[in-house]
Image (tube, rainbow, N blue to C red):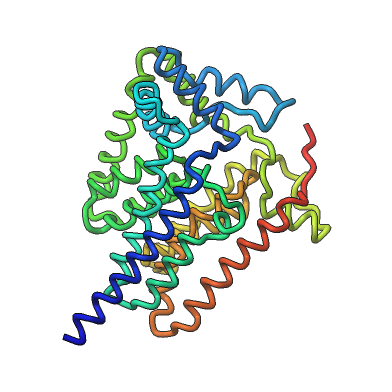
Amino acid sequence: MKNKFVNITKITVIAAIFLVACMLRLDFFGGAGKDIYAYERSVEDLLSGTNPYKWTVATYSTPDDPGNHGYAYLPLLLYLNSFFYIISKLSGVSFYILSKIPILLADVGVGILLVKFLYRKNYWALLGALLFWFWNPYFFMKNNYVYTDPLPVFLSLLAFYYLEKDDVLAGAFLALAIAAKPYSLIFLPLFLFKAQRPLRLMLSTVIVGVFLSIPFLGSWNDFMTYLNGAVLVHGDRIVQGRPFLWFISYYGKIELIRIIPVKFYAYASILLGWVFIVIAFLIFKIKEKYLLGAGCLALFYFFTPVLNRTYLLWLMPLFVIALYNIFSKKQVLYYFSLLFYWGFYYVYLFYWKDGFHIWHP
């Protein structure tokens, strides 16, 4: 009887955390971020039969306005937005509100996966993880819900969950994560190393990717516009946000940037993660998938010339699980590491408003 009461109490506390987190986010459902025009324009182009990536390529070719870009991701979010845009027109409900539904579901989905991983292992570690995720520094400081990052985070975490269990699902969710935001591409070598049947995983990823790309395969010109707008434009990006190397250069007065072209850092942020996986897996025999994934993202953060406020959310669930696997018998270090990351993220956002790079066209 006592155990039953304890279990009910535990579940009630977890449910309360989810409920409060959702209610706080619902308060901001009517808000719109700076990218909303790009999202609406891309949806309208797609629904009218125009390739939305034409406008994307055009906006990236205008160096005088680096902050005004078209939709520059693979099309998963574009399809979701198109669906809710149609519902909005039919129902009269604001598109801003409807478009946040999949983001909230993904946000909750990350929490559910954390529960699945930690509930039977360590209840207090789970509570720390849920608070860490739902009250992340960005949400805590900005008090808005205009970001879409929970969607790719949830999909990539699902891919990690199924990795070593089901190659088809792992590959499919990896493709969906990449289609939401392409940062998950850095995990590809890790997934191939850890898959039970790498070819099956790769085929699953490719099939889902091709399926999502069907609307842009009508002609060679459409396909190349799609490829340029969704992928290749990122290789020519200028410094945006507050990248770590620029932070170090600015405050440490150490010149790390202008010696080497920005494009080098754009490619290094991806390729060095792949090199890290090969070295860690084959030479140092590190097999823990969440730790390897976290290492890839850490390298990406260090080298990328584009680091927006929400990017540090991508690492948080992987960081939690990797930490627990390392410090499961040293709980103090687990909680300290969570607090350290949360504090680092908070302080970094605090310095954000001052700026610490100058863009030179």
- Residue at 54% x, 58% y: name it: 298
251 left or right of 85 in image = right
- Residue at 35% x, 71% y: name it: 13
- Decide which of 337, 165 is in the foreground and name it: 337
Q: Residue furthest right?
A: 253
- Residue at 67% x, 32% y: name it: 67
Q: Residue furthest left?
A: 1
Assign the C terminus to one quadrant of the image: top right
Assign the N terminus to one quadrant of the image: bottom left
**Residue 288: x, y in percent?**
37, 67
Does 71 sit above or below residue 139? above
Q: Quadrant of residue 49?
A: top left
**Residue 16: x, y in percent?**
36, 65
Q: Quadrant of residue 216?
A: top left
Does 292 sit above or below residue 104? below
- Residue at 57% x, 55% y: name it: 138
**Residue 176: x, y in percent?**
35, 40
- Decide which of 354, 131 is in the foreground and name it: 131
- Decide which of 318, 94 is in the foreground and name it: 94
Residue 52 visible to the viewer: yes
**How many tags in the picture?**
0
Does 47 sit above or below residue 270? above
Does 31 sit above or below residue 355? above
- Decide which of 55, 265 is in the foreground and name it: 55
Q: Quadrant of residue 6?
A: bottom left
